[in-house]
Image (cartoon, rainbow, N blue to C red):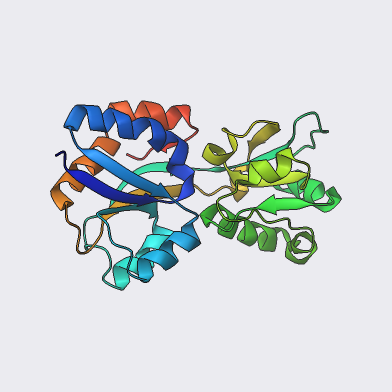
Amino acid sequence: MAVEIIAYSTLACEHALHDIVPLFERASGYKINITFEAGPDLMAKLRSGLAGDLVIGPSDFTDGLLQEGRLIAGSRVDFVRSGSAIAVREGAPKPEVGTAEKLKTALLAAKTVSYSRGVSGLHFARVLEQLGIAEEVKSKLVAPQGRELVGAVVARGDAEIGIQQLSELLPVAGIQILGPLPDELQRFMVYGASILAGAKEPAAAGEFVSFLKSESAAAVFRKNGMEPNG
């Protein structure tokens, strides 16, 4: 029987990994059983004792697991980075969002806004504080539920403007991506893979981590709106 690697990932890398996992399986002969979940929910399950071999996510979420001894120290390998973008419903007016001041004006004019509970949403909440409109936008928030993407909220008309990582907006039909967050507000979230303490297949998991740094994987990440890290 083929070695099976049990892996978990937050949602930003999901669409890229759907293509990368089969490439690795064919090259290695290993099987990967990977589960995708919203970052806060996944971290809670791992803290409650969810077993496996590998965790993929931003350090914002995994640093706490490392400090608690749930990840093997020194095992994390960063492999890709991802920025946030802005979207509206397909066919809707396209506000100017190319500068911080223009984005502020668009957000104040919108009746509803959506952003995630994940790392991009946590960053965007800080952006709203920086712009001085946190309370105004909070009252307009239409939050995605569970594994739902912000783009889906925008596509069905529940939010006029949505902000999430580009890799999570690209797969959604029915939206227009206006562009990235303005440079002065942008933050590139770095994604890495860490070996879980108690992993049954740490060596095989390590091979998959190495594959995530390969040129084959890099091409897929680029296609999905992410940039290889290093």
Judge by depth and name the residue closer to the eye, 6 or 138: 6
Task: Determine which quarter of the picture holds residue 129.
Answer: bottom right
Q: Position of residue 34 (x, y in %)?
A: 35, 46
Image height check: is 63 above or below 147?
below
Q: Residue at x 44, y 42 (%)?
A: 13
Quarter placement of the C terminus: top left
> Which residue is situated farthest in the bottom direction here?
68
Q: In the drawing, does residue 184 fall left or right of residue 131?
A: left
Task: Determine which quarter of the picture holds residue 66.
Answer: bottom left
Image height check: is 67 above or below 7?
below
Q: Residue at x 37, y 70 (%)?
A: 47
Q: Position of residue 32 (x, y in %)?
A: 28, 41
Judge by depth and name the residue closer to the eye, 4 or 11: 4
Quarter placement of the N terminus: top left
Image height check: is 173 above or below 110?
above
Q: Residue at x 22, y 62 (%)?
A: 72
Q: In the drawing, does residue 116 fall left or right of residue 211?
A: right
Judge by depth and name the residue closer to the eye, 175 or 110: 175
Q: Position of residue 89 (x, y in %)?
A: 75, 36
Q: In the drawing, does residue 168 fall left or right of residue 153?
A: left
Q: Residue at x 25, y 43 (%)?
A: 209
Judge by depth and name the residue closer to the eye, 128 or 168: 168
Q: How many marks?
A: 0
Q: In the drawing, does residue 166 fall left or right of residue 222?
A: right
